[in-house]
Image (cartoon, grey):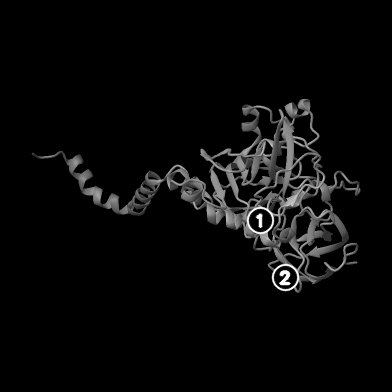
Amino acid sequence: MILPRKTRNLLHSIPNFIKILKIPVILIFVFGILFSCRKKDDPLLSLLTNNRMTVILKGTFATDDPLQFNQINNDNIFVDPDEPIFINTIGLPPYSLLPFYIDIGEIRMSSKFDPLLTVDSSKRSEEFWDTLSPYRQVYCSQPYALDPQLDTCRKTGGFINYYEFMNGRGSLYPSLDVGPGTYLHVGVFLRSLVTGFGYVNNLPNTPKFDNNDVYGTNLMISSNYNPESTDAERQLLPPQFFPLSHSIALGQQVVMHQDESLRPIILEIRFNMKENPMVHAYDEAGLNHSFVGFSDWRKNHLGQKYTGGNVLARARMIYPDISTHVRITGGTESVRHYYTLYISNECADPNGFALCDKNLDYLPLAATPVRNGVNTLKDIMPGSYILQCRYDAIYDGYPEAVLSERIITVPQGPGEINFACACGASTTTGCP
């Protein structure tokens, strides 16, 4: 059969055409294989599309070198001394052996000026939030299912992530990039949070976690509202753990801005969980509930069902190419003293009028327990800061007492800068 001339010319041109498209065809083929093999919870898509931002989660008050579990309260979990009702502490594990099970659904950010209180519907939520990560992550300190296939934590590296989440380095959270701008809200949407201790009327409590029965208490309900909140207030207020959020105060926006360059950014999000477990109790419908929640350092718990208002979140963006390590000397090692850092004008208007109590309403921008020798606060962006010496006077895990403050200036990095601040030897004074 004789083909028409146009057809013959087209066939002769195909080899050259393939040569021209050789690299793109190979890339398309490789991407096709990768995506066709991708499992539902595999962060591969994030790794391929995330060119700028690395997201790190920390479950610690301290940004740097937090205390080991067994250093806190002599390895004893705090017990609420003010609880007016019976607390069952039979079988309470050492601090370092308390199981944690944490299920995170997603992370979102928003540049909207509106308060979270206005997000009262699914439609409003879609308008308000930008999705930073739609990927579920499960962290756990120990296995919770005999069958590994029923244990999402074990299947997805949740043991290692939990260890990083609690050791100060932070767990890497798979994420997408978001556009440039100043972000005023960051929300971590928790699906479940269980601590491994709990009784209901002196019988072991066994809530569900990841569709498995575990021993302990799910804190998702009790931690969502302040102890003194009324039924009417709970109908109006957003739950505190869905999302566990940081809505920035005036002055904090300087470390929540993403510029239009292609420079790498680290988004660090942290919560005061590791240092603050505490046993509480409440009575409901004639049943006594004893459980490990969190220290009531901020919102006092006196037998109510709810224990919220005591876990805070703080987010900051770090540009590694211009950040500086702040080295502090003059400390005397103490498990109850901390060096902390706040932005010098956060929570204040341009005239210096206080708009909130930074020490009560926000975690420090950075913090580390006081040790002998050099104490380092890493990756501090250039600017003016308040360096504090703080002390856990009540001894509930949270250093609420500010012993001293001084203004410091951190230059543009990379590099290090040194400051001297006596802290740790006194329970009433710090560095001048």
Reading the image, the residue beneath label 2 is 416
Q: Nearer the viewer, residue 158 or 12?
A: 158
Which of discs 1 and 2 lies nearer the camera? The answer is 1
Neighbour class for label 1 at 10 Å: few (<14), some, many (≥20)? few
The numbered mark at residue 237 is none
Q: Is residue 227 above or below residue 373?
A: above
Q: Earlier in the sequence, mark 1 or mark 2?
A: 1
Q: Is residue 384 visible?
A: yes
Query: Residue 190's x, y, as percent?
Result: 62, 41
Q: Is residue 347 left or right of residue 255?
A: right
Disc 1 on helix, strand or loop? loop
Which residue in the structure is indicated by mark 1?
A: 94
The residue carrying pointer 2 sits among few (fewer than 14), some (14 to 19) or many (20 or more) residues within 10 Å by Cα, namely some
Q: Residue 225 at x, y = what percent?
A: 74, 35
- Where does the image place residue 74, in percent across and percent down from the top left? 72, 61
Is residue 175 depicted above or below 432 in this figure? above
Viewer-side residue, 247 vs 429: 429
Q: Is any atom of residue 240 visible in this view?
A: no
| Residue 224 sits above or below residue 378 on the image | above
In the image, 162 versus 290, the foreground residue is 290
